[in-house]
Image (cartoon, helix red, strand yellow):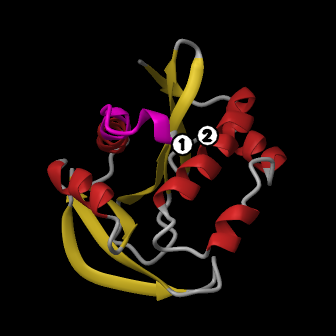
């Protein structure tokens, strides 16, 4: 497995991975119609532009197997209120056929290392309540549930409940 910073040429693969991972992982949490409507080609030009200008506000890493991108993670500026010198793990998505191989764990470990090297004091994330595999991975890597929760229906039209996790660096 090869891990590297994503490049603009990876945008299509990232879009496909996001759709496949969401459709497989979020069936219990999101409406089937919403998951069916996901479009891997959506916002690719915006993603390519962001990949060409990565910094501590947005950094995307990929995992490759035999030259094929099979997973990605995103860290960036917190999208919600956060303590100073905090960065957020926005996403970890792995193609379902590559689940339970340690790829997601490796991407989270890389995000933690990047955040520490970049001078942040902590890394945080929000995880859908009930997404037990993800919650177990984060806890195993030293993330602690803070007790903060949020709920929103903005994304899917139904209310999603999320739990906040944080890790001191």
Q: Position of residue 62 (x, y in %)?
A: 52, 31
Please, what secondary structure does the residue beneath circle 1 have? strand
The residue lying at 50 percent from left, 59 percent from top is 77
Visible residue check, residue 52:
no
Q: Are marks 2 and 1 in contact (CB under 8 Å)?
A: yes
Residue 6 lies in quadrant: top right
The answer to if 60 sits in the magenta stretch is: no
Q: CA distance from mark 2 to mark 1?
A: 5 Å
Please, what secondary structure does the residue beneath circle 2 have? loop
Given residues 20 and 1, the one toward you in this image is 20
Question: In the image, which disc is placed on residue 54?
Answer: 2
Query: Could you classify mark 2 by the number of other residues whose Cα lies within 10 Å: few (under 14), some (14-19), or many (20 or more)?
Result: some
In this rendering, is residue 129 above or below 121? below
- Give left or right: position of 47 versus 117: right
Question: In the image, which disc is placed on residue 28?
Answer: none
Query: Could you classify mark 1 by the number of other residues whose Cα lies within 10 Å: few (under 14), some (14-19), or many (20 or more)?
Result: many
In this rendering, is residue 98 above or below 44? above
- Give left or right: position of 132 versus 94: left
Question: In the image, which disc is placed on residue 59?
Answer: 1
The residue lying at 46 percent from left, 71 percent from top is 28
In this rendering, is residue 14 above or below 35? above
The residue lying at 35 percent from left, 61 percent from top is 86
User: Main structural element of the magenta stretch: helix, strand or loop?
Assistant: helix
Q: Which residues are magenta?
A: 96-107
- Looking at this rendering, what residue extends furthest in the right direction? 45
Mark sitting earlier along the chain (2/1) = 2
Q: Position of residue 65 (x, y in %)?
A: 50, 18
Given residues 31 and 143, the one toward you in this image is 31
Q: Position of residue 91 (x, y in %)?
A: 48, 53
Given residues 79 and 16, the one toward you in this image is 16
Q: Position of residue 158 (x, y in %)?
A: 58, 86
């Amino acid at each position: 497995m090869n891990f590297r910073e994503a490049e603009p040429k990876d945008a299509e693969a990232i879009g496909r991975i996001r759709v496949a991972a969401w459709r497989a992982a979020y069936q219990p949490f999101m409406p089937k119609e919403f998951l069916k409507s996901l479009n891997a080609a959506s916002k690719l030009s915006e993603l390519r532009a962001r990949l060409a200008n990565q910094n501590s506000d947005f950094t995307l890493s990929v995992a490759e197997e035999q030259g094929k991108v099979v997973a990605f993670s995103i860290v960036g500026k917190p999208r919600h209120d956060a303590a100073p010198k905090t960065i957020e793990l926005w996403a970890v998505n792995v193609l379902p056929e590559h689940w339970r191989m340690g790829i997601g764990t490796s991407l989270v470990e890389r995000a933690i290392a990047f955040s520490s090297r970049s001078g942040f004091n902590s890394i945080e994330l929000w995880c859908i309540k009930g997404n037990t595999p993800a919650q177990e991975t984060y806890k195993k890597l030293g993330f602690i549930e803070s007790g903060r929760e949020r709920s929103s229906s903005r994304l899917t039209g139904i209310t999603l409940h999320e739990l906040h996790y944080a890790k001191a660096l």
